[in-house]
Image (cartoon, grey):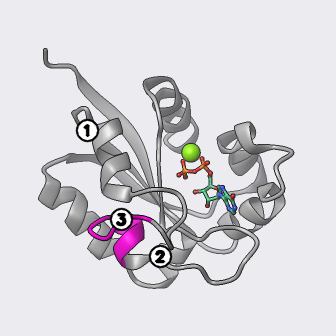
Amino acid sequence: MTTIEETLVLVKPDGVARGLTGEILRRIEAKGYSLVDIRLVEADRDLLAAHYAEHEGKPFYAPLIEFMESGPTVAIRLAGNRVIEGFRSLAGTTDPTTAAPGTIRGDLGRDWGAKVQQNLVHGSDSTESAERELALWFR
Ligand code: IDP
Ligand code: MG
């Protein structure tokens, strides 16, 4: 079955600040996914509150919003069969210390001792999240 999906990928402010946008795009393109749209965004509080609504009330929520406001983010609309699952696999697990080597977070990320994990990228986790998040970042 061929169902071409789209997902939202973010290169978070740590990835942009560390000059890793190109390396992250290289990995995405080398995997074979298609860039549909890309933009540099200075995310404001309303956008971030909507994007991370599921995490409101968690101990890392306020540090997460502050981190995401700390600099520009690169937002990418990415397409391909099973791209949602495929990009999450490329990204690796949430904690960069234990994310598998070979993944973006495992190869390029580390713990910096902050209250929130600075793990370089975001990828939508379901078709519902992708649709919702793409509408927020590419309105
Ligand atoms: P994901 O980005 O791997 O989907 P989520 O659980 O959706 O992970 O969390 C959103 C973001 O919040 C993570 O990418 C990370 O930056 C941060 N985060 C999640 N869980 C923790 C935690 O337990 N401690 C610190 N930061 C966290
Ligand atoms: Mg998530």
Closer to the camera: disc 1 or disc 3? Answer: 3
**Viewer-proximal residue among 84 and 74:** 84
Q: Give the x, y percent position of residue 13.
A: 56, 71
Ligand 1 within 8 Å of the CB at mark 3? no
Q: Amino acid at mark 2?
A: Val
- Mark 2 or 1, nearer chain start: 2
Q: Residues within 10 Å of mark 3 (few under 14, many from 20)?
A: some
For disc 3, the marked residue is 100
The residue identified by callout 2 is 16
Which residue: 35% across, 67% down?
A: 104
Q: Residues within 10 Å of mark 2 (few under 14, many from 20)?
A: many
Q: Is mark 1 within 8 Å of ligand 2?
A: no
| Local SS, label 1 | strand
Question: Mark on residue 39?
Answer: none
Q: Which residues are magenta?
A: 99-107
Please give the label number shown on residue 79.
1
Q: Nearer the viewer, residue 17 or 108?
A: 108
Q: How many marks?
A: 3
Q: Amino acid at mark 3?
A: Ala
Give how far apart the Cα atoms at labels 2 and 1 are: 22 Å
